[in-house]
Image (cartoon, rainbow, N blue to C red):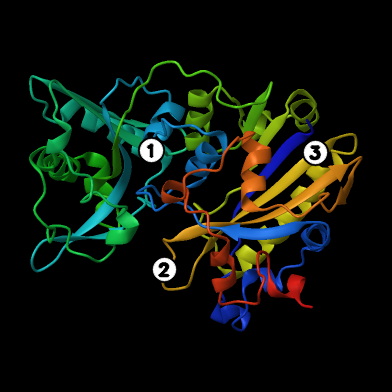
Amino acid sequence: MKKVIVFHLGSVFDISEDSLEDRTPLEVASTPHLDHLYSRSFSGSFSVPNIDDSFLVTHLMSLMFGYKNFQHSSVQLAEGLECELNRNDIVFKNNFVTLKPTTKSLSIVDPSGSSLSVEDKQELTEFLNANLFKKRDEYFFLKTNSEGDSVFIYRREKLEKDSVSFKQFKSPYENIGREIDGTPQIKEQSKRFMYIMNESQMLLSKHPLITEKSGSDFFFPNSIWLYEGAFVEDQSENENIVEFKSASVVSSNLILKGFSKMTGMQFFPWKDFKAKEVFEENEFVFIDKEYSKYQFDSFEKVDRIQKLDNEILQLTHLLNKESAKVLFLFNYPYNKNSLGKKGYSFLLTEIEKGKFYLPRRKFTIFDLLCFISNAISPPEPSCSRFIEKKFNQRRTVNPIILRSKVFAS
């Protein structure tokens, strides 16, 4: 079997912007290598299941590999942060946020704690862990790493799942400017999480770090926000689910690190990535170049795309002795008014001795899944909803994966 290499390129910045004369950053950017790849690839698009999880790529990989015990990305992030987890623990992603008073309650102003350094976040994490009130039968803690990623782990004896609802705990980015107390009735245990956030606000308001800096900076963070909560499912040892002798993930994303740990794949952060060795020693390599968690202005997006094009060129030079199926995956929003609903577009090509060729025949979505997962039967439509017709519903030039000038006939 030939090797399989997947490049996950994340957001393609295909929304037009006024500062670029109503063009998308991808229309403006010079991407000669990706332009060449398109001429040597089959292209297509598919939707993903409607799951309550903002990080879809691990769910997509789970579908590809037939992994049934899918863990929410909150749990995978905790695994990536090396947290000790038990079955039925509750894991939330956590942000330090700025709350401001309104006429009725409070609203989120800064959802990312941008005024805090990583050291500040770690100091406040330790402070809250030491001072938040705990009941006799419960255990919880916050953990914030050297990159600023943060989670909240909650454990309680005889916790009934029916007493917990996660619907109230959405991303702080979805709550900017909204009054946070204007929420529908929540379940009993969820009120405890709301109480913990309220208590953290009262504690942080008296912390020297907050009192010293908030006077000169109105947007200085003053609370925490728990979101995207999930139960930890069965943590028993999983056999290697990948049908390859060896498989690796290259990424700086701790969610992917947690996914790799759970599925028996090797994980390499970019700083430890030795491309030649990884390509030679693995049958499957997943390379993550996602930048969507960073905030770029229009011209920075153009620059980032051009750098990405050059990085792909450098990586493919290292494949001059390899024969492999190569899949390029791109996130895209279905439309400007629904940026939260995302799917994937793809370029599928083959490389032999450093040169890209069209695959031997056109691949369907089923073929695409099969050559990655060695699947015997396609996934159930009710749970996977891979729909090629979604590809034809794009508002931009059809077909569009990278940018309109690439596909101009």
Location of residue 259 in the rendering, given as x and y in whole percent from the top left corner: 49, 31
**Label whose residue precedes the other's in the sequence (3 or 1):** 1
Tag 2's secondary structure?
Answer: loop
**Label whose residue precedes the other's in the sequence (1 or 2):** 1
391 left or right of 306 in image: left
For mark 3, what is the residue?
A: 324
From the image, state whether disc 3 or disc 1 is nearer to you: 3
Instruction: Name the outermost residue toward the top.
Output: 237
Res. 309 image quadrant: bottom right
Residue 11 visible within the image: no
Residue at image coords 70%, 47%:
327
Residue contact between numbered discs 3 and 1, judged by CB atoms under 8 Å: no
Q: Nearer the viewer, residue 183 or 52?
A: 52
Location of residue 168 in the rendering, given as x and y in whole percent from the top left corner: 20, 51
Q: What amino acid type is highlighted by mark number 3?
A: Ala
Residue at image coords 30%, 46%:
96
Image quarter in which the N terminus is found: top right
Mark linked to residue 72: 1
Q: What amino acid type is highlighted by mark number 1?
A: His
Location of residue 156 in the rendering, given as x and y in whole percent from the top left corner: 16, 24
For mark 2, what is the residue?
A: 338
Q: CA distance from mark 3 to mark 1?
A: 31 Å
Instruction: Name the outermost residue toward the bottom.
Output: 21
217 left or right of 337 in image: left
Q: CA distance from mark 1 to mark 2?
A: 22 Å
Q: Residues within 10 Å of mark 3 (few under 14, many from 20)?
A: many
